[in-house]
Amino acid sequence: MTNDPLPQQRRSKLVLEHVSKEYPVRRGSSVVAVSDVSFDVVDNEVCVLLGPSGCGKTTILHMMAGLEDPTAGRLTLDGREIIGPSRDRGMVFQGYTSFPWLTVEENVEYGMRLNRVPTDERRKRVDFFINKVKLTRFRHAYPKQLSGGMKQRVAIARMLANSPEISLMDEPFGALDAETRWHMQELLLDIIDETQMTVVLVTHDIAEALFLADRIVFLSNHPGRLREILSMDFKQGRRITSKEELIETPGYIEIERKILHMMRQEAREVE
C-alpha cells in the first residue's frame, strides 16, 4: 500500500516515473534490481530512501545522479530528463573522497575550478561553506590530518560549493562512529535549513532516517518496489534538530515501531 503525503504547497523538484533497472547476467538472462518505482521529491525536502539490504536504494540514487540509466521509465529534474551526470546534481558518497594531495580549501574549490567559476566567486564560496561545516581552523590541513567526520564535512562543503539543484547522499555517515554520526546529522540539518537545499539521502539506519527525513520512501525487498511513502507527521511540519527532543516527541515511538514491523515483514519474505 502506498500513502503518498506529497506536500501540495511545494512544487516537485525531482520526479521518478515507473522507473525500473535490470542488470544483465550470464546466458542472456537479467536480474531486476528496481521495479516500477514512482515518486516525487519536492523543493527543500529531505527525502530518505529506506528499506532492507538489496532493495535498490543506491541504484535509485545512482540513476538520480545519472551514473546509471534506467532500463524503463524516466527521471526528471525541474522537468528536464536526467541523462548522465551534471553539475545540477551534487553527490556525497559513504567513502572519503577528498584528494589527499589537496588541502581542505583546495578540495572544496576543486569542482569550481573545473567549472571555471571566477576566482573571486570561488574564494567567497570556499570561505562561506568551510565556515558552514565548521572547518575554518583546518582550511590548510590535508585529508590525512583530519578525522573521518571532518573528511565528510569537506565532501559536503565541496558538493555545496558547486551550487547543485539537488544534493544526493549515499549513506554519508555510515562509516562514522555513533557520536560523530549524531553530530554530523545535526550539522547537516542546520545547513539544510540555512541553505534551503533539497536532499535525497540513502540510509539503512532507521534512527537516522527518522531524524533527518521530511518523508521516507520505503522500498520492498529485492527487487525494489515502492511499498509506502511515510510522512513524518509527528514533527508537525518542522525539522527537529536535537536527538533528545526527537525521541521525546509524541508519535516518534509509533512511527519507529511501524518501520521496524515493515522491516521484519520484508525479512520474512526472503526466508
Image (tube, helix red, strand yellow):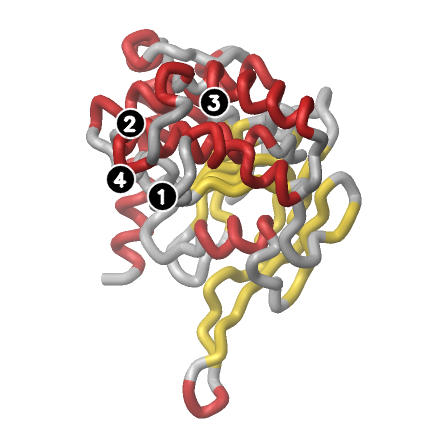
Say which label, 4 or 2, has the lower sequence index.
4
Q: Give, as a three-letter code, the residue at label 2.
A: Arg
Residue 100: numbered disc: 1
Mark 1 lies on a secondary structure that is loop
Tell me what residue is drawn at x 63 percent, y 53 percent.
85
- Circles 3 and 1, Cβ within 8 Å, touching? The answer is no
Say which label, 2 or 1, has the lower sequence index.
1
Residue 177 lies, with reference to residue 99, above or below; the image says above
Residue 106 lies, with reference to residue 57, above or below; the image says above
Residue 22: numbered disc: none
Foreground of the two, 104 or 41: 104
Tell me what residue is drawn at x 41 percent, y 23 percent.
139
Task: Please tell me whether mark 3 or mark 1 is closer to you in this view.
Answer: 1
Task: Find the distance from the CA under tag 3 to the CA under tag 1.
Answer: 39 Å
x and y, in percent, of residue 153 in the image: 40, 28
Crowd class of label 4 (few under 14; some 14 to 19; many from 20; radius 10 Å): some
Give the left or right position of residue 146, taking residue 28 as reference.
left
Crowd class of label 3 (few under 14; some 14 to 19; many from 20; radius 10 Å): many
Q: Given the current orientation, which residue lies at the most extreme right position?
A: 79
